[in-house]
Image: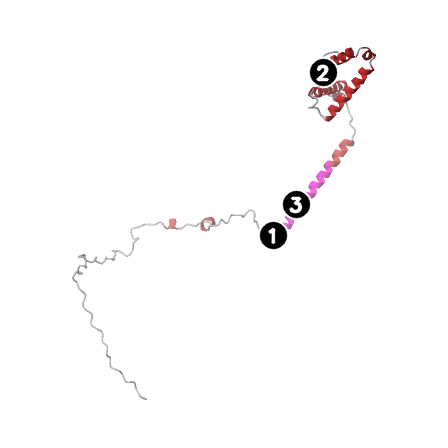
Amino acid sequence: MVGKVRRPRLHHAAPRPPPRLDPPAPGPGGRSAPAAKDWNFSSSDIFSGLTIDPNSLVKKLDLDSRSTVSFRTGLEEKTLLSKKEKMKLRKERWLQKIESVKLAKQKQKAEAKRKATPVVGDMQPLMEALPELSDLKAVIKGKKESQRHVKAKAEPADFCMMKQAQKHRLLEQEVAQFHEVIADPRYKANPLLVVSEHLSKRLRQEEGKPL
């Protein structure tokens, strides 16, 4: 077995100069370099003079404060129900619908029964409370006359403003009066007198004066 030959060390570390105690030389601008800051504190405990109550440090936040989304959002609307509870709610809704249909049918039957049941008892108070037939007829007659009077006044006197039915009725009246005038024996004797009388009568009718 052959051993290794140890090579001689050619490089040696240069000796370091001792630290300089003199202040540093001024810089190129004539200003001296700033001295190094002393970062040594008098005490390593920065909270040594501060008294803190441990109870004030214990604080629990609710879920709304710890999260950006409120956990109460949609809690009432999105209540999780079991399959059994859903079936129960569906059954209750069906029962309510059936009950409402039954009530409607009972109401219809009761109404039909009331209509078919004759009224018995003393009818004198009811007869006294109702108006008499003659009074009702007088009221209806007065209303019809007032309506007829209003309609007669509402008819326009101008032939151009009349409706087609009004024009036709007016022409029929004029033709009937014309035939009546021609058939009058006085027309043959004195036509001018009969025509003047007819015109004066017509004017009085339009003005509403007595003939």
Q: Position of residue 2 (x, y in %)?
A: 31, 88
When the figure is inspected, residue 73 is found, relative to residue 189, above or below; the finding is below
Q: Residues within 10 Å of mark 2 (few under 14, many from 20)?
A: few
Q: Is residue 141 left or right of residue 36?
A: right
Q: Which residues are magenta?
A: 83-107
Q: Residues within 10 Å of mark 3 (few under 14, many from 20)?
A: few
Instruction: State yes or no: discs 3 and 2 in contact (Cβ < 8 Å).
Output: no
Predominant secondary structure, magenta span: helix
- Residue to which mark 3 is pinned: 93
The kind of residue tagged 1 is: Ser
When the figure is inspected, residue 200 is found, relative to residue 28, above or below; the finding is above
Q: Position of residue 54 (x, y in %)?
A: 37, 51
The kind of residue tagged 2 is: Glu
Tell us which disc is closer to us: 2 or 1: 2
The kind of residue tagged 3 is: Arg
Q: Earlier in the sequence, mark 2 or mark 1?
A: 1
Give SS at disc 2.
helix
- Residue to which mark 2 is pinned: 206
Mark linked to residue 82: 1
